[in-house]
């Protein structure tokens, strides 16, 4: 865990940021199930289907939007929007688009859509590229911890 925190610190994330996120969530009383901004746009407006079809992050546009899980998902084209609408769970990033490494450390942290990986046909986002590198060092271990934390969070409704 210490090693992972070192990677996070190198990427510009400090313990203060994580503490702020946790305190802000506690004050709010709940957390959003999807990584969305105040405008309710998921994953900073990136097209989640493009990771699978184009193997790269691609900005979506409001013109091709779909609402799911209380957030607006933007897509680069109508085909991507329709694919998502037909099977959102297939294309949506795991952990609501929050940082996979953060989840493995028991924290819900915003993620950068440019720091991504597809593992076993599931999309995972991370805080930044150094955090993604740390995540990839032990993907299986980090995912096991992240899944356990996410399950606990969603069961408790936080």
Image: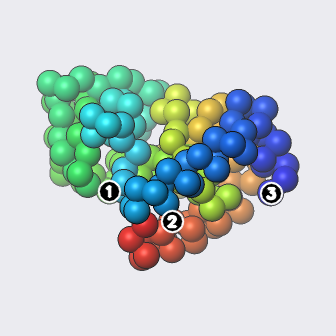
**Element carrying mark 2:** helix
| Foreground label between 3 and 1 | 3
Precedes in sequence: disc 2 or disc 3: 3
Q: How many marks?
A: 3
Q: Which residue is pictured at 42% across the width and 76% down the height? A: 155
> Which element is circle 3 on?
loop
Would you name the residue on which mark 1 appears? 89
Q: Residue at left 26%, top 30%?
A: 75
Residue 143, percent from left and from top: 62, 60
Q: Secondary structure at mark 1?
A: helix
Q: Is residue 132 left or right of residue 1?
A: left
At a point 78% along the width and 47% down the height, the residue shown is 5
The answer for how far apart the CA atoms under marks 2 and 1 are is 15 Å
Residue under label 3: 1
Q: How far apart in space, not on screen, are marks 2 and 3 (Cα)?
A: 18 Å
Image quadrant in which the C terminus is located: bottom left
> Residue 85 versus residue 153: which sits nearer the camera?
153
- Is label 2 in contact with label 3 (beta carbons under 8 Å)? no
Which residue, given by chain and number where applicable, does mark 2 sit on? 150
The residue nearer to you, when weighing 59 against 29, is 29
């Amino acid at each position: 865990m210490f090693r992972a925190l070192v990677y996070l610190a190198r990427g510009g994330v400090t313990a203060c940021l994580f503490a702020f996120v946790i305190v802000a969530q506690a004050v709010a009383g709940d957390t959003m199930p999807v990584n969305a901004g105040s405008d309710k746009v998921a994953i900073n407006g990136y097209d989640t289907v493009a990771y699978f079809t184009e193997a790269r992050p691609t900005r979506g546009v409001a013109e091709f939007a779909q609402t799911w899980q209380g957030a607006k998902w933007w897509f680069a084209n109508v085909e991507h929007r329709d694919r998502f609408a037909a099977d959102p769970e297939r294309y949506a990033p795991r952990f609501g688009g929050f940082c996979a490494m953060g989840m493995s450390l028991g924290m819900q942290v915003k993620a950068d859509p440019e720091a991504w990986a597809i593992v076993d046909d599931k999309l995972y986002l991370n805080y930044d590229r150094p955090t993604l590198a740390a995540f990839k060092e032990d993907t299986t271990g980090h995912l096991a911890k992240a899944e356990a934390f996410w399950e606990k969070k969603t069961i408790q409704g936080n």
